[in-house]
Every structure is written in C-alpha cells, then in structure tokens.
Amino acid sequence: MSDKTNDQNPELKAGQFRALTEAEIASLPGQPGNPGRRGFMKMGALAGLAGVGGTLLTGCGRGATGDQPVAGKAPAAAATSMPEGHPTEVAPGHLDEYYGFWSGGQSGELRILGLPSMRELIRVPIFNPSFAIGWGITNESKRVLGKDFPPGGDLHHPHMSQTNGRYDGRYLFVNDKTGTRVARVRCDVMRADKIIDIPNVADIHGMRVQREPRTGYVFANSEFRVPSPNDGRDLDDPKKYQTMFTAIDGDTMEVSWQVIVDGNLDNTDCDYEGKYVASTCYNSEEAVDLAGMMQNERDWAVVFNIKRIEAAVKAGKFKTIGKSKVPVVDGRHGSPLTMYIPIPKSPHGLNASPDGKYFVANGKLSPTCSVVAWSKVDDYFDGKLKDPRDAVIAEPQLGLGPLHTSFDGRGYAYTTLFIDSQMAKWNIQDAIDAYAGKKVNYLRQKLDVAYQPGHCHTSLGETRDADGKWLVSLNKFSKDRFLPVGPLHPDCDQLIDISGDQMVLVADTPVFSEPHDAVIVPRQLMAGKIKRIWDRKDPFFAETVAQAKKHGVVLEKDSKVIREGKKVFVYMTSSAPKYGLDSFKVKKGDEVTVVVTNVDDIEDLTHGFCLSNYGINMEISPQETSSVTFIADKPGVYWYYCTFFCHALHLEMRGRMLVEA
Ligand code: CUK
Ligand code: CUA
C-alpha cells in the first residue's frame, strides 16, 4: 500500500507533499460520511487528480511567519523549491524550530532530532557503549556507568526536568528497563552524569518527572514482579513476588522511597500540583503467564499520595529490604497511601492533561480510554468519595488498542490505536458530557498511521505550554513505507501537523529500533543552555584533572610520561593536526592510562584518539580532557591516530605506542 506516496502524483517529485483538499479531508476516516480505511487508501488516486493545483504541504499555512528572522522555517517561496527527496519543510542551512529528545529503545541510547525536519541531529549513548565517542571506554564515562556495567540497556522514556509545570532545560531523565536503572543526562553537554541502580525491584519501565514545584522527584515504575530480595528464595512461588513504585531525588540521584503495590506497574505520570502521581497497573491477576494475565476485565490506575507517603517515611512506618537502606512503605489494597481505580483492561499509557485537571489511562485491551479527574482523587483521599471508580468521569470509545494519549492545550486529545493503526483525535469535554449521558460526538477524526503506533507525543504536550502544533506517531512497523533493507525493518516515526482542525500527516521518518517515547521542546527554550565547547572546569573530567595535578602536570600544555611502578600515565595535548607526543614507550604488562587534552578552542574541532589493535577509541572535543586505561599486553608498535577529520593533515595526526617485550 503506497497510497500516500507520490507514485500516483507524478507532478510532484519524490518527497514533496501538497495540502489536502477539503474533499480529501472530508474523506478521512472519522469524518462524517467518510468511506473508512478503504476510502483513505483511494486518496492517493484522488491526490493524483488534484495535481499541482494544491499548495505544497511544505507551505501548509506555516510558511514565513515574519517573527522568526533566524532561519526556522524556510520562507514560503523557498518551500516550493525544496531539495528533492527531503521529507521536510526545513530548507538547507535553516534550523529546526524544535528539539526532539527521542528514546532509542533497545539501542540503549538517547537521540536528538530536529523538528519539523525529523532529521537525527546526534546520538547520546547512555546505557550502550559507543566506540564512536568512547562511551564505556573512557575513564570519564566509566565513572558514570559504574564498574561492571551491562552491555547495553532498553531505554523507553526520556523526560525533561520541569519547574512549575514547564520544561527548564536542566536535565533529561531516562529509564533502562532491562538493567533496572535510571540515568540523568545534563542538557548543557548532553552527556549522562549519573546512572543509578534501583534496588529491590526489576525492570524499570514507566518513568516521569515531578512537575510542581519542580523536579524534584523522578518517578519510576518497575514492571515485573519478582521475589524481594531476589536472591534465590521463593523462586517458583509467584504469590511471594511483588513490585514497587520508586521515587528518586533528581538532584542527588538517590532513591527517596519505594511503595509496594498489587499487580504490576506499567506507565506513570503526575499532576500539576505536586500532590499525586499515578501509574497504570496491569496483571492484577498477578499471573506469570499470558493467559493468566488477561483474565480480569479491569485492572487499575494506582494513585500515590506523595504527602502521605513522605509523612509515613518520616514517621518511621517503613521497612528496608536486604542490604538496601531505601525506606519501603506498603501501598497495597487498603493502604491509606494509595488509591486503586478500576480501569478496563490491562491499561498501558497514562497521560496527564496540560490543563492540570485530568489524567487519561489508555485501555490497551479495551477500546476505551478512562479519564480520571484529579479533583475526584482529592475527594477520595478526603473521604468524600467512597468508590474509586467514581473518579472516572469519561470513558470514550476510540478504537482498538489505545496505548498512549497526547494533548494540544486546546481541549483535544490524541490517542494511538495500536491495532487499528490509527490516531484518534477527540474532545475531552465532549467525552465527559457523553459519559454524563449527553448525546455528543467526542470523536473528531481518525488518521491512518503506518503502522501500529505506540507512543504519540505533541509539542510541549506534557507541560503547561502545550502549543498544539506538532504530533509525532511513533510506529512500531514500517512494512512498505521504505526501501527494503533486509528482514529487520526500521520503525516509522510520522510527523503530523495538528495546528488546524484536522490532523495532517507531513513526514515519514525511518528510525532504528526502537523509539518508544519522545519529548518535543522548542529551541528558544534551550537557547543559551547548550554549550558549544567544554568548560575546562567541567565536573565530567574533573577527577582526571585532579589526578594530573597530583602528577604536577598542567594538562593544557604538558605532554609527558609518568611512571609509578607498573602504572604508566601518558599525558598529551591535541591541537590540530598534532598530538603533544609523537611516541611513548611502555613495557608489556604495564597498566597504561592515556590522557588527552584538546587545547583547540574552535567550535566543532573535535579530535579522536584511536589505538590500533587495542580496541580503543575516544572523542576529545574542544577544551575536553578524555582518558582511557588499559593493559599493554601485546608487545610491538601500535599507532594511535585521530578519528575525527579535523584538519587537512588529519591523516598525519598520529603517533606510536612502543610496547617492549
Ligand atoms: S511503552 Cu513502548 S509503546 Cu515502554 Cu512507554 Cu508504550
Ligand atoms: Cu585531529 Cu583529526
């Protein structure tokens, strides 16, 4: 199916799009009188007929705004002369308007995209080693990763720190499902500076940050139930398995407290007042096989009362488990610390609306989303609401497989339908009215996406600043959308314009496995926050600087070798196109630490240090110090050379390590 490609629209070059006509929009699924999916598939033919009469979608009423003198959008005139094959509206040399911080899934990395071009700008390795920059190889990165770091991670959820419900550009926090870890990334240099193991639990999945008054807490769900402590006891006695909700102090990256729950936790989000955080909770059956996990018609959204939990911890009403000192409170059914709201069926995503009034739990195995009012949660904890189910104030029926919901700040919600391969746009107030018995149609549009969407995310949609401009659909399958590249297909992330009444698909982007979630942040918000060269006083390599100081070495100018028994420290500068040392000599079996300081202070003038046949490469960006420690176990001549093309004489930028037998 290639209904939306330009095969049928020969007037347009590959990658060019034009705006839908009124008639085409009316034919979209979800529109009154629409002919359904089949009709949508016919749209390609329709588009062919319409020919070049329509405006290019690249213009899309979003051309030059006049208030963006610095690049941003290409002027409307330039939009018609977009480079061939470029699926975007950002012309060469122009900058994107938004940063997209993208999960890398089982790649273990964070990715930074530009929107609306959907261009991948850079990858930030976090749980995954990266030979390109030396993550997992350098001493500096190993200090963050810890001693015996696993070979990778499964990063699902990136979220930026907030202050008063708005992104503040300090940190990004990410989870590692397989390694039961949470990492913090500094937004100024886009490097992880803390990675912590979460004790007592397994598989950190859903993760969000406290919005009010600031982050504050980072909340993490552990999904799989295991014995606790998980030390070989109670192996095949699932009744003794449990899981917990974890709150981390985002400033110190220490675990503040944990709450034992029933079921297993999936996704999580918090309110805009700093009072509550809620998690979807499936497998209320507490089974360990597929059939068993799908028995109940309803599972839960669990709401955690932050103040009460803090008070319980303060009053000493907690236990600790095994060697961990983390206070653990009991939040299972009947606890005054939690509220279990029945939600159909095995709910997955949980998303708080930017007006601060509601959260939406996405039904997954039910065609519904459940809208819960935070005010009713207040009522429940105040004793005014007896049945937690009465906190549900709407349950719109949207389609098959609702997984995640995003908001535009104008009262609309956008929900991914995994099984239907569609995005549903619906009106929250209408859904509430319909639940109350009024005859209203809350559904506004269904847009086919390709294919099987997981998360969706709107620009600024998880903050008070939700601007209703862009929506991304992070699709798990791409099938026929791209050139075949072997049995493993890329995923397909699609950009959707939501600035008008109708969602309009504007770009397909192939992505490597497997983005789950993303956040979209305007570039103005990051202006001045991102460094372009390192600060010599940066804490990332401060320990290496301190070690050099002990050796009496001034990193910015000294290049010398210092021997301490079998330990050899090789200090050298790098300045295009030369290392401070043309060669150094060690003995077989020495523990060698090479410390390279890039004294160039020109933006983008990065050097590399690659040591042949020793499996070593590292990046040294302007004003950075990077170091690596290894055993010189192979005698002979080994060249080290620069891996970042830095100068016309880059290939000559090298030297020799001489290892005596
Ligand atoms: S989860 Cu993957 S599609 Cu890990 Cu946020 Cu829903
Ligand atoms: Cu330094 Cu290439």
Image: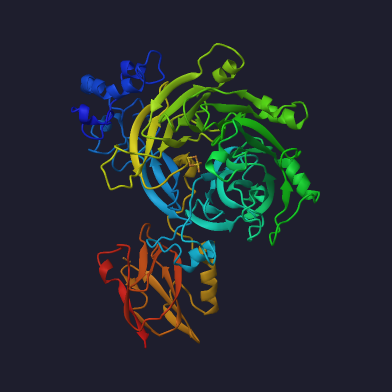
Nearer to me, 595 or 637: 637
Residue at (23% x, 33% y) in the render: 81
Q: Position of residue 237 (x, y in %)?
A: 64, 51
Q: Give the number of callouts.
A: 0
Q: Residue furthest right?
A: 315
Residue at (57% x, 23% y) in the render: 395
- Quarter of the rendering containing residue 582: bottom left
Q: Position of residue 131 (x, y in %)?
A: 38, 63
Residue at (39% x, 26% y) in the render: 447
Q: Is residue 353 above or below residue 221?
A: above
Nearer to me, 553 or 153: 153
Q: Is residue 481 visible?
A: yes
Q: Position of residue 45 (x, y in %)?
A: 24, 22
Q: Residue furthest left?
A: 10
Q: Quadrant of the C terminus?
A: bottom left
Say left or right for 261 vs 594: right
Q: Is residue 53 visible?
A: no
Q: Quadrant of the N terminus?
A: top left
Q: Residue furthest top?
A: 439
Colour pattern of the rendering:
rainbow
- Quarter of the rendering containing residue 28: top left
Residue at (36% x, 34% y) in the render: 450
Q: Position of residue 83 (x, y in %)?
A: 24, 38
